[in-house]
Structures are given as structure tokens and as C-alpha cells.
Image: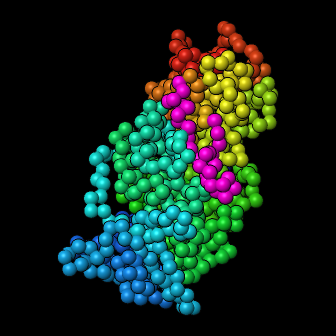
Amino acid sequence: MADTEDNVSIPGLNSLLQMDPYLKSYQKDFERRYGLLGKQLAALEEREGGIDQFTRAYETFGVQRRHDNSLVFFEWAPAAEALFLAGDFNGWDKFSHRYTKQPFGKWELVIPAKADGSPGLEHGSKLKVVVHTENGERLYRISPWAKYVTQQENARVYDWVHWDPPEPYTPVHKRPDKPRSLRIYECHVGIASPEGKVASYSNFTANVLPRIKDLGYNCIQMMAVMEHAYYASFGYQITSFFAASSRYGTPEDLKRLIDAAHALGIVVLLDMVHSHASKNTEDGLNRFDGSDSCFFHAPPRGQHSLWDSRLFNYSSWEVLRFLLSNLRWWMEEYRFDGFRFDGITSMLYHHHGIGRSSFSGDYSEYFGLQVDEDSLVYLMLANHILHTLYPTCITIAEDVSGMPALCRGVEEGGLGFDYRLAMAVPDKWIQILKEFKDEDWDIGNIIHTLINRRYGEKCIAYSESHDQALVGDKTLAFWLMDKEMYTNMSSLVPMTAVIDRGIQLHKMIRLLTHALGGEGYLNFIGNEFGHPEWLDFPREGNNQSYHYARRQFDLLEAAKHLRYVQLYAFDRHMNLTEDAYGWLAAPPAYVSTKHEEDKVIVFERAKVVFIFNFHPTRSYQDYTVAVEVSGKYPVFLSSHCKLGGGGGGGS
């Protein structure tokens, strides 16, 4: 990879081109990208001693305690005229502790240990970096490397809190093995309680992790952990990239949560937002050194017009140091097992996907001047480093464009992700439920959507995620049963046609997606039992209400007669059956029947035969289907048997 030419020979490119001959026309594009990656790696080796040292900058920047208990503060602020440190320790004196300027825009300050040998700053004390600019401004900033920030009640901005506990949490359990089949429980700690409040890491550890284990999921994907000042941003407007959100508890609480998940054999992924950053200044990265760039491109390139946020300059050496070290920090300090990278489409293209309702699939859309190769090479570099240093690391890309080779190794010319989200699948289910009567469902189109993925690139299939749960949209359960979910979900009253149809289709849609749609599966917290309400965070538009920022697990525990229990049971047995047969880890299914008139789908995967009858009024007896191997096939999972807990009809 150390070749200095733009166009270089890629070891595995031939295998990629054989897999997809249409990419042959873009061979030089792959070679150029790979050459740029090689240049970066060669420069890292020459200037920084390699990827391991370069990606451990969190051990140098911010605040570090030496063995003698002196504290070293180190920042990158190239446009600053002077830096000072103020805080509880010096009575918020704005001038008493001045940083010394170092080469390349770096600044350093040393605070010696106290006379008794204890650290010069107490654990939990508050701090600010005071930045003086060339034009005479005095700015109060939080270190970009801050490990903990908190917000006082009714305060406008966050405070930087020095986090150096005398007894830090030490993990007990080793990381679980990388799952053969990935079954993901997408979750948000703050809403993981029936109560109208911000729930805690401790609550999640005690009350939600056992539920996830019982349901048969082997992976959790944690949203909104990286600190974000605005709760209603769902964690997508990051202000402090190295800080675990304090609204749920302390860093030690999060470490206990992840360790407890590992004890249950569950791997933990972090929702990683490196596609953009909050434009906040006093408690964010924006204008940290007083300039309109620093970590970002200068406007207009450095502004995202739809997200109202800042865009990183991935060609900057110090930005690479910051972002790549950020990945190592979460892997090392908190022992996450990988990442779901958010907003990849925005990163890959200069147009950020703005103004494009969809991509046609024409390969010319994925190459040429519209591609932001700085961002693309950053993603290649991130995946290469993560998979080199952590062979079991899992990375998932959220990309709506369908970029070819996104999930092929960098040694083949790909971007190196393990999986991509099959984002067309939930859109298709919502479209069907919104626009078509049951008898008008296009079976062939459904099958096409579920199997239409790039050969050799793994996908995470899902029928709905957090996107469909948000206010303004509806979950599948709500589309299917709507207001009757409030009145007719009790098994103590007669089953209505709406509830019967809704329960059966909820199960069938999820099982069909699970078995046919990809090489991994994802469910958003609460949707496994058909959560009856949308998700809406407290904001001005709803009078800061927490009523919809919760998950009503009490519908399962306090009221066993409610039919939500049936949906929960089906979801559990669906996962346990996959665990036994491993269809997600098997090659793509062979679809033997897609009968439009009968509304029947039949396919085989992992030696399991799946038969779905989506006809709204017809059931069939002695229906003949083709199988690869003759013999008797016991029924393990059905939407109308007691195992699945339902009414009539089914799969």
C-alpha cells in the first residue's frame, strides 16, 4: 500500500471485477482511491510511527495525568493568538494559567501536583479553555477531547468536567466472539423505560439487557451515546466526540453496561457520527480556535445546508488524528465492538445526496467529480485501521446511494465495511401499507426489493428502524392497526378483523424480511412487540413532553392479557429459530414460488423451507411446493400457531 503513485495495482481487484464485470470501466478510479489510501498509510508510517501511535492521540491531547500526578493540557488551535485555562481550581481566573505555543498550532500547559502529591485538579472540577483570537475576541470553549461534560438544570450550554475517578471501573468479561449471524437490537438508553423521563445506563443494564438476551438478539446498536447538547437531535448533532452522554449517567455506568452485555454474549456497536458535527460554539467543535474552519472546511463547503451543521475537512492531518483516535477511544476505553457509521451518503458525495430523492443505480453516479474522495479515503482508512487492530470489529454503513464495493475489503479496492443497511426494504413496506389494498400487493416487487442487493456485499435487513418510529411517520404496527391498538389489543375482548390482520402481517413481514432480506437483521427497541406509539423527544413543539420519549415495556409485564405479548413471543422464537439454523449466515435464498394470484411466496435458505400466504381471504390445503431435498419437514415457526401466538392465517 505504500506505493506513491495514484494508480496502483490492487491485490484483490480482479476478484471484485469478476464478481461485477460492470465495474471494469472504473478500474482506474479504484486504483486511484487505493493509491490515495497507500499514500496516507505511508505518511502515517513515516511521520507518526504508524497507525497504532497516530490513533492514540487521546493519550496526548486534552488533559493527561502523569505518574507524578502533574497534569498536562494539550490542544490544537492553529488560529488562536493565546490560550488560557480557567476553572474551579483557580477561581475562574482567565489569565493565571497560560498555555505555551508549540509547533503546528499546538498548545501545552502543565499544572504540577499539589504539595501533598495529589493531582493539581480534583476529580469532578469544572474547566474552560479561554481562547484569545487575533482580532481581540475572548472565547470560552470546551476541549474537543473532553471525556465528560454535563449540563446544569436550565443551563444553556454544557460544562467541561475533569473526569479522573479514584476507582475507575475495570471490565471483568472478555469481548464475545464475532457472531456468525448478526441479530441487532437498535436502542436508545434515554427512552428505554416506561416512565416519562430520561432513563439511565443503570436502568438499561438491569432491565433492558436481560430482555434483549431473552429475545435472542446477539448485538445491540446504541444510539445517541456520543454527547449531544440537543436531546431531540436523536444524537445526530454531536458536540463532544469523546464524551459519553452524561444525561444517562457517568462514564463508569456505561462501562458497566457494556461489560454486562459482554457477559451475556452480546456485542455492542456504537452509532458513530463522523459525517458532520453540531454548529454549537461554546460547547461544540465549531470555531474552537475562533476561525470558521479548524476541524471543518471553511464555508460554504464546510456547512450542510439541510442538517444545519458543520462538515469535517478529511484532508486535514489533525482532523484525521482527531477522528481516527476517536474510533480507537470508544474501542479501547469503553470496549465497544464496532460501529454503525451514520450519514455515509452525505460523506461520499460533494452534493451530500441533497436534491436526490433516489439513485438510479447507474454506475456513473458512483464515480467522477461528484465523489468526495477525501471522505471516501477517510472511510477506507478508518475501516483498514479498525479491522487491522481489531480483527473482530464490525462496521456497518448507512448509505442510501448503493455505492459499489462499499462492503468489500480495502485490499480489493472497496471501502472495507462489513455490512450496509438495506434501506430500501423498510421504505417498501411502508409504501405498500400506505398505498395498496391487501389484494393488490405485488408479490414479485416485494421479492425483488428483498433480494436486490449487491452480490458478495452483506446487508442488514430490517422492516423498520428508528426512522419509521419517529413522530411524523408510523411504525408498522400503527400502519396496520392504528387506533384499535388502544382499544382492542386485550385478549379478554373478541379479536377484531383489524387486530387479527395486523398481528399476522406484523409477524409475516418481519419473518420474510429476516429470512430473505440480508445477512443480518435489525429491530428498533419496542418494535418487537408492536409498540403502540411513535417516538417524539421533548421539544418546544410538544411543550417539552416526555410522554412519547419512552418505551412502554409495562404493556408486556403488567398486562399479560394484552396481545403485545404475542408479538414479543413471535419475535423471540424467530430469532431463536435463526440461531438454530443460521439462515442469515447462509448464501442467499432460492425463491421457488412467487405466485401473484395466490399471493404465495416459497423459498429455501439454510435447508429451511419458508412458505408465506399473503392472500387476504384464501387459505390453502395440500398446496404443492418444490423442495431441494425430499422428506418430512416439521413446522418450527408459524404466525398462527401457539408458538407465534396469533390468530388465523399465516406463514
Residue 648 shows up from this direction: yes
Q: Is residue 156 above or below residue 500?
A: below
Count of numbered circles on the image: 0
Please state the horizontal and vertical placement of residue 588, each as a whole percent of the image: 57, 33
Seen at 57% across and 91% down, the residue is 135
Quarter of the image that includes the N terminus:
bottom left
Seen from the viewer's position, the closer of residues 168 and 546 is 546
Please state the horizontal and vertical placement of residue 454, each as a whole percent of the image: 61, 44
Coloration of the structure image = rainbow
Q: Quadrant of residue 137?
A: bottom right
Please state the horizontal and vertical placement of residue 56, each as a whole percent of the image: 37, 66
In the image as oriented, which residue stretches furthest toward the left?
A: 116
Residue 574 is a magenta residue:
no
Q: Is residue 631 above or below residue 247?
A: above
Quarter of the image that includes the C terminus:
top right
Q: Magenta residues, as a range?
A: 532-560
Q: Main secondary structure of the magenta part?
A: loop
Please state the horizontal and vertical placement of residue 598, each as a whole percent of the image: 75, 19
- Classify residue 287 as left or right of residue 209: right
Q: Is residue 283 above or below residue 201?
A: below
Residue 555 is a magenta residue:
yes
Seen from the viewer's position, the closer of residues 53 and 297 is 297
In the image as oriented, which residue stretches furthest toward the top?
A: 622
- Classify residue 9 as left or right of residue 649: left
Seen at 50% across and 87% down, the residue is 132
Seen from the viewer's position, the closer of residues 240 and 117 is 117
Seen at 65% across and 47% down, the residue is 470
Residue 27 shows up from this direction: no
Seen at 53% across and 36% down, the residue is 553
